[in-house]
Each structure stands twice: as C-alpha cells, then as structure tokens.
Image (cartoon, rainbow, N blue to C red):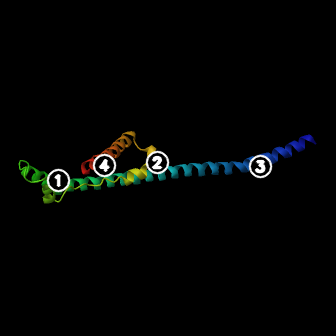
Amino acid sequence: MKQSAFRRISKILGKIGFELIPVIVGILIALVINDYQESLNEKERIDVLLNNLVGEYTNRRNEIDSLVTYRHQPFVDTLENYLHNSQIPIAEILSKVGGFAFSEVYTVSWEAALSNQDIGKLDFELLTLLSKISASQESLGVVTQNLLN
C-alpha cells in the first residue's frame, strides 16, 4: 500500500515536473527576448542623443562662423581704421558697425542628456569633452556679461 501511494505521488510529481519544463523554458526565452529588445532600445536612445548633440553643436558652430564672418570681421576692420583717431568716441565706432554681436550658445541637448539615464553609457572621453564645452559656454556667458557691464 505504501509503495503504490509512493508510486502515484511520484507519477503525479513527474507529470507536474514534465509539464513545468515547457513553462520554464518559455519564461527563459521571454526573458532573453526582452533583454535583447531593451539593449536595442538603449542603443537607439543613445544614437538619438548623440545625433541631437552633434546637430546642436554643428548649428552653433555655423552660427558662430557666420557671426565672425559677417559681424566681427567688419567690426575689427573698423576698429583698426579708427585705432589712431582719438577724436571719435568708441560709442560712435560701435554704432558705425552695428554694435556688438553675440551668439547665444544653447545646450538644450546637453541639458536633456544630463537628465537621461543613458548618459552613463556614453564614452568617457566624449562625456569629458561635452562637459568641457558646457563649462566653456558658462565661462563665455560670464565674460559676455562682464564686457557688457
């Protein structure tokens, strides 16, 4: 009697175990697929982040190049022209060239990147470079304010 009860319990446990194997394998496959999808999504988010940063800094550089070409060079030329003429006040020279021109250096993408959890996955050298650009931008703002005061 004990042996038949033991056999029945063994049989039931064997069936349950046999039926659990596909469930466990299915769960493991689902976890692997989910992990793969997450890594693809992470890579896509990082690519978007990098493209935004490159686009933003490219636009800023183009704006600065344009400013130097069309505003600063004429300003420097005018200053050189009136350099030895102490009769003309600096305000008049400034009005002849249209005043100072500054380019705003926005770092919207960088600020957004700082709040993004994926930023830690970027290359350390790239993060260092972007941090230096941001610090330089802040310094430029301070210098600009000092010039205007």
Q: Position of residue 95 (x, y in %)?
A: 15, 59
The reply to whether the C-beta atoms of the residues labelled 2 and 1 are less than 8 Å apart is no
Q: Which residue is mark 3?
A: 15
* Residue closest to the eye, 36 or 68: 68
Judge the density around disc 1: few (<14), some (14-19), many (≥20) Cα neighbours within 10 Å: some
Three-letter code for the amino acid on which mark 3 is drawn:
Lys
Give the residue displayed 73% in from the left and 48% down from the top: 18
**Numbered disc in front, either 2 or 1:** 1
**What's under tag 4, amino acid-wise?**
Gly
Q: Residue at 93% of width from left, 42% of height from top?
A: 1
Q: Earlier in the sequence, mark 4 or mark 2?
A: 2
Q: Which residue is mark 2?
A: 118
The spot of residue 65 in percent (x, y) is 21, 53
Which residue is identified by label 4? 141
Give the secondary structure at mark 2.
helix
Q: Return the disc, 4 or 3, that comes first in the chain's sequence.
A: 3
Front residue of 106 and 20 = 106
3D distance between C-alphas at marks 4 and 3: 74 Å
Position in image of residue 114 (x %, y %)? 43, 48
Left or right for 21, reference 68:
right
SS at mark 3 in the image: helix
Residue 75 vs residue 6, the one in the foreground: 75
Where disc 4 sits, the SS reads helix
As helix, strand or loop, the secondary structure at mark 1 comes to helix
Quarter assignment of residue 70: bottom left
The first of marks 1 and 4 along the sequence is 1
